Image: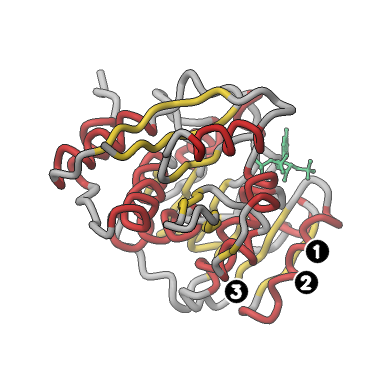
Amino acid sequence: MDYYAVIGHPIGHSKSPRIHALFAEQTGQVLRYEAVLAPLDGFARTVRDLVAQGYRGFNVTVPFKGEAFALADELTDRAQRAGAVNTLKVEDDGRLLGENTDGAGLVTDLTRNLGMDLRGRQIIMLGAGGAARGVLAPLLAQAPAALHIANRTGSRAEELARDFADLGPVTGGDLDSLQGRRAHLVINATSAGLNDQVPPLPDGLLYPDADCYDMMYGDRPTPFLRWAARHGAARTADGLGMLVEQAAESFALWRGVRPRTAPVIRALRPVQP
Ligand code: ATR
């Protein structure tokens, strides 16, 4: 039996054990996957203990993605770019490969599940923290016409845009930089929703056929998606699909088998009243 775990703090509400159990059942892979709470000052120790016990891989979530990046012996290009690791694979020689599947998960959800074509589109990303950084490279690889990052602290967005400027047409600014801009797709990568808030956004931000995507998810529409619905978004989606898709990428890296995601997304989607 091969063992895997998601490591975070807190970790109690993680959906990852359920997702990976469904993947294992569907693909006939024999494995166990559990949630592990690491002490805030004990991420590296927790990983080492689990590796010593024979664990084969880990998902890493808040607040340890930066520490996982530092701990990895080897990094994929996209983990290097993201500056963060959400997936660790224990190689046969015990070395840790660090990967980041968040951006691929987002792009797969947008393009395959939601049927969007991002080529030539105007994209606005709200937020310039770790969540935004983690997905920029795969988004730019879709060849949008422009990707503008708007953040409460404008300098962080400008810095992020500079770091990715070699990959495509990316700019950054404060929330005032949204005045006069329009988007085909607005992605919320801020954590404002955790406090039931939405960054202040201009009324005319959305083209009539615009999509809005919140990387957060919840049992009810997030504050950003409620804003989107009030401001004429053609379509809104939360980050549940991204969560399942990033998990599928991790599963494929560990097991060499790619699970189908649609039935798992359906199984996790709360039943609408
Ligand atoms: P994460 O890893 O989730 O990205 P983070 O690095 O702390 O976490 O970044 C949080 C992001 O949400 C930042 O872009 C932050 O804006 P600042 O850089 O100005 O702090 C943004 N954010 C959080 N709360 C917000 C709020 N109430 N309104 C607008 N932006 C908010």
Vertical relation: 260 (above or below) 112: above
Residue of label 3: 146
- The CA distance from mark 3 to mark 2 is 14 Å
Kind of residue at badge 2:
Arg
Q: Residues within 10 Å of mark 3 (few under 14, many from 20)?
A: some
Residue of label 1: 158
Q: Looking at the picture, how far across and down is residue 125, in whole percent?
A: 61, 56
Which image quarter has ligand 1? top right
Disc ID at residue 47: none
Check the image and tell me how it is coloured: secondary structure
Residue of label 2: 162
Kind of residue at badge 1:
Glu
Nearest the viewer among 115 and 17 is 17
- The CA distance from mark 3 to mark 1 is 14 Å
Residues at marks 3 and 1 touching, judged by CB atoms closer than 8 Å: no
| Mark toward the start of the polypeptide (3 vs 1) | 3
- The CA distance from mark 2 to mark 1 is 6 Å
Q: Is label 3 in a helix, a strand or a loop?
A: strand
